[in-house]
Image: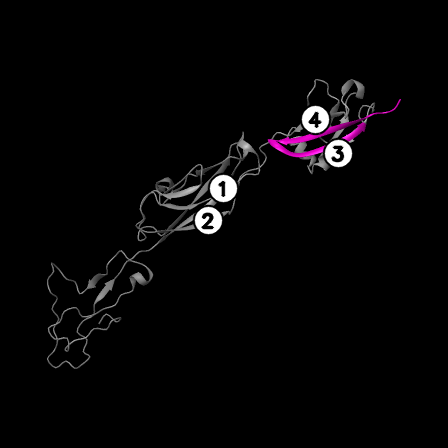
Amino acid sequence: MTRRVLLFMCLLSVGTVLGQVSYTIPEEMAKGSLVGNIAHDLGLQTKRLTSGRARIYTRGSDEYIELNRERGVLLVKERIDREALCRQTTPSVTLTLQISDVNDNAPVFERSSYEAYIVENNTPGLSVFTVKARDADWNQNARVSYILEDSSVNGVPVSSYVSVSADSGVIHAVRSFDYEQIKDFHFRVKAQDGGSPPLSNNATVKILIQDQNDNPPQVLYPVQTGGSLVAELVPRSADVGYLVTKVVAVDVDSGQNSWLSYKLQKATDRALFEVGSQMEK
């Protein structure tokens, strides 16, 4: 008897069709005969077929082909009679290999740690920056949500300082910050996928508060009470350069915002006195 051949079309489905391969075999092949190495031909690892619970679908009720997940090959399962199976001029059978996704990948942040800045006296609700994580799984298993992990800053819950948008990963300032009260703090954000059970990963975020020039200098000496003038006695015989007094002042701001300079603002006769702009004298 002349042996006829059958054309098997195999579609790979992982949510959407990602690949297609065809095999031609003669009819009447023995059970267990090799049809094709589908794992190799579609560029899949055999463990992906196993973890994804790969299976074969056919249009009819008869199953002529089976998938060996461990080897990644298609095998003849039942005797194939071309005349009984296919009566069209070009005999072919379409099989669908479906691989369902397993939640085997945790979300991964773009960076393991982040650093961001907030200028003090900010408006509450300010968008500071965004953390981002990606998940290599599919559909619900790849859906990432962001969670602010419980911790405290100076004994206060971190949730009273910042918040994180569960969907977008945007970090918002909950309060207005004062550099003179807090200069920096850190916390952790968790990225969690939608699988069951869910997988997660963490990233550390450090916030640094930037100083503004929002504090005037304070004169510590000479002490002035009730707006009264401070009197200093100068000997009639004082020579040029005689030290009359020394003004001590401080500014609680930071960096250049705390640098002080001095000048005479009012004097009955400016020719009689001078003040060192940096020397406080």
Q: Which residue is mark 1?
A: 202
Whole-number angstrom distance, CA of label 2 to CA of label 1: 11 Å
Residue 149 point in image, percent of width and height: 43, 39
Above or below residue 174? Residue 235 is: below
Mark 2 vs 1, N-terminal side: 2
Amino acid bearing label 3 = Asn
Residue nearer the viewer, 262 or 165: 165
Above or below residue 210? Residue 20 is: above
Q: Residues within 10 Å of mark 4 (few under 14, many from 20)?
A: some
Q: Outermost residue, front direction? A: 89
For numbered disc 2, what is the local secondary structure? strand
Whole-number angstrom distance, CA of label 4 to CA of label 2: 48 Å
Q: Residue at x 71, y 33 (%)?
A: 21
Judge left or right: residue 170 versus residue 53: left
Judge left or right: residue 191 versus residue 267: right
Q: Quadrant of the C terminus?
A: bottom left
Q: Which residue is mark 3?
A: 37
Place residue 43 in its image quadrant: top right
Above or below residue 67? Residue 243 is: below
Mark 3 vs 4, N-terminal side: 3
Q: Which residues are magenta?
A: 1-25
Q: Which residue is mark 4?
A: 95
Q: Which residue is mark 2?
A: 114
Whole-number angstrom distance, CA of label 1 to CA of label 3: 40 Å
Mark 1 vs 3, N-terminal side: 3
User: Was residue 20 drawn as part of the magenta stretch in this picture?
Assistant: yes
Tell me which secondary structure the magenta stretch mostly adopts: strand
Judge left or right: residue 139 versus residue 244: right
For numbered disc 1, what is the local secondary structure? strand
Q: Which-is-in-front pick, marks 1 and 3?
A: 3
Amino acid bearing label 2 = Tyr
Q: Residues within 10 Å of mark 3 (few under 14, many from 20)?
A: some
